């Protein structure tokens, strides 16, 4: 099949090449009638612009970049489990981008690199994205935000912890969600509840730990130092935490892990140690990843709407979609969460 070109679109729409170019590059002052005529012609012909054409001076790149943490992403893939968070985030943004013929690019960023600013500026100059989605911990990295501001590149921040006047911020109340899950365990009669954290660099880790402590304090329950184990959002860290807790705090009756991958590691290790879940031990996670519904037993967790947050970020960054929105581009949006109670948590046996 012959490649459809901009000339074919112009002929089909009955307009000039320049008019087609203005519409496809989302230039201002284009009449709705012209835009509709060109877009319908392009759709009927199955026209898609090439990335090489978009890279020409003055042309729109039609590209949105997503910056993700290199360390954690690589750790997930080395373990052979991949990253469900990244997959859902990519899906949410991609579904919005494909509606208007935009492309999505995932870039790994080492937020601890001494050359972070230099590397970011080189990346921005190379791909010239029209917008950037920042995921934790990049969403709170001032070096990253300063570089984007200097380049004049709009950005959206998922799960930001501070400086909410910078970029478009979208998040859920993770502290409140963790408090609610801990309350759920307490309501089931558990008083000796352990918690497995995420990486220290992540604001989400601190907020979820704080929510756990809030609920324990609210119920008048002390938190023994041995009950809080350090993790890193990976399956292996959950298994290791379970093994250590079995040795140092064998009297605990419930474990709340700061994400589902960690909780699944806890479940596997508990089974290996001969512990019944939820008979001997209740286990809860955070995220509601697909694996949470297929584990044995299925996992009680907090549903974090990752795909929805990514979609909202993409809508704010992609010009054709942004025109349909109202409100300040520098806004902070809190999305709702849900507590999903499944078979891994149960009332404590008396």
Image (cartoon, rainbow, N blue to C red):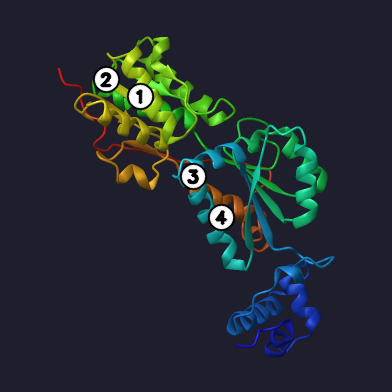
**Position of 309 relative to 140 (above/below):** below
Rendered location of residue 80, percent (x, y) = 45, 45
Crowd rating for badge 4 (residues with CA inside 10 Å; few <14, some 14–19, many 20+): many
Rendered location of residue 232, percent (x, y) = 50, 30
Name the front one of labels 1 and 2: 1
Query: Who's the residue at 25% across and 31% down the image?
Result: 271
Q: Is residue 277 left or right of residue 256?
A: left
Q: Which residue is mark 4?
A: 93
Q: Which residue is mark 1?
A: 242
Mark 3 or 1 closer to N-term? 3
Query: Who's the residue at 40% across and 22% down the image?
Result: 195
Q: Quadrant of the C terminus?
A: top left
> Of helix, strand and loop, which one carries label 3?
helix
Crowd rating for badge 1 (residues with CA inside 10 Å; few <14, some 14–19, many 20+): many
Observer-nearest of 115 and 27: 115
Rendered location of residue 281, percent (x, y) = 25, 25
Name the front one of labels 3 and 4: 3
Mark 2 or 3 closer to N-term? 3
Q: Which residue is mark 3?
A: 85
Mark 3 or 4 closer to N-term? 3
Rendered location of residue 328, percent (x, y) = 67, 47
Residue 180 shows up from this direction: no
Mark 4 or 2 closer to N-term? 4
Q: Is residue 274 left or right of residue 176?
A: left
Mark 4 or 1 closer to N-term? 4
Residue 291 shows up from this direction: yes
Real-space CA distance between mark 2 and mark 3, rounded to the nearest whole angstrom: 28 Å
Residue 253 is tagged as: 2
């Amino acid at each position: 099949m012959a490649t459809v070109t901009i000339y074919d679109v112009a002929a089909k729409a009955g307009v000039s090449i320049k008019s087609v170019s203005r519409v496809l590059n989302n230039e201002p002052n284009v009449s709705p009638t012209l835009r509709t005529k060109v877009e319908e012609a392009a759709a009927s012909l199955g026209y898609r612009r090439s990335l090489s054409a978009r890279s020409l001076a003055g042309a729109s790149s039609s590209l949105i970049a997503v910056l993700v943490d290199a360390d954690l992403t690589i750790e997930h893939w080395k373990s052979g489990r991949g990253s469900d968070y990244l997959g859902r985030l990519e899906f949410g943004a991609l579904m919005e981008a494909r509606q208007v013929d935009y492309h999505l690019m995932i870039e790994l960023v080492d937020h601890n690199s001494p050359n972070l600013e230099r590397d970011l500026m080189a990346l921005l100059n190379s791909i010239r994205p029209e917008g950037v989605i920042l995921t934790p911990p990049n969403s709170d990295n001032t070096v990253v935000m300063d570089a984007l501001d200097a380049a004049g590149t709009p950005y959206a921040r998922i799960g930001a912890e501070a400086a909410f006047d910078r970029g478009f911020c979208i998040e859920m109340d993770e502290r409140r969600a963790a408090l609610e899950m801990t309350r759920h365990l307490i309501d089931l009669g558990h008083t000796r509840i352990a918690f497995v954290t995420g990486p220290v660099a992540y604001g989400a880790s601190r907020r979820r730990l704080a929510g756990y402590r809030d609920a324990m304090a609210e119920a008048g329950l002390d938190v023994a130092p041995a009950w809080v184990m350090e993790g890193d959002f990976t399956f292996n860290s959950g298994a290791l935490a379970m093994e250590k807790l079995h040795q140092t705090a064998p009297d605990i009756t419930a474990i709340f892990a700061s994400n589902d991958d960690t909780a699944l590691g806890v479940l596997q290790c508990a089974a290996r140690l001969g512990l019944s879940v939820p008979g001997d031990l209740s286990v809860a996670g955070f995220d509601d990843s697909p694996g949470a519904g297929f584990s044995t037993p299925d996992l009680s967790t907090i549903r974090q709407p990752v795909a929805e947050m990514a979609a909202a970020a993409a809508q704010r960054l992609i010009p054709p979609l942004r025109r349909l929105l109202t409100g300040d581009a520098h806004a902070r949006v809190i999305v709702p969460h849900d507590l999903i109670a499944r078979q891994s948590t149960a009332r404590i046996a008396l």
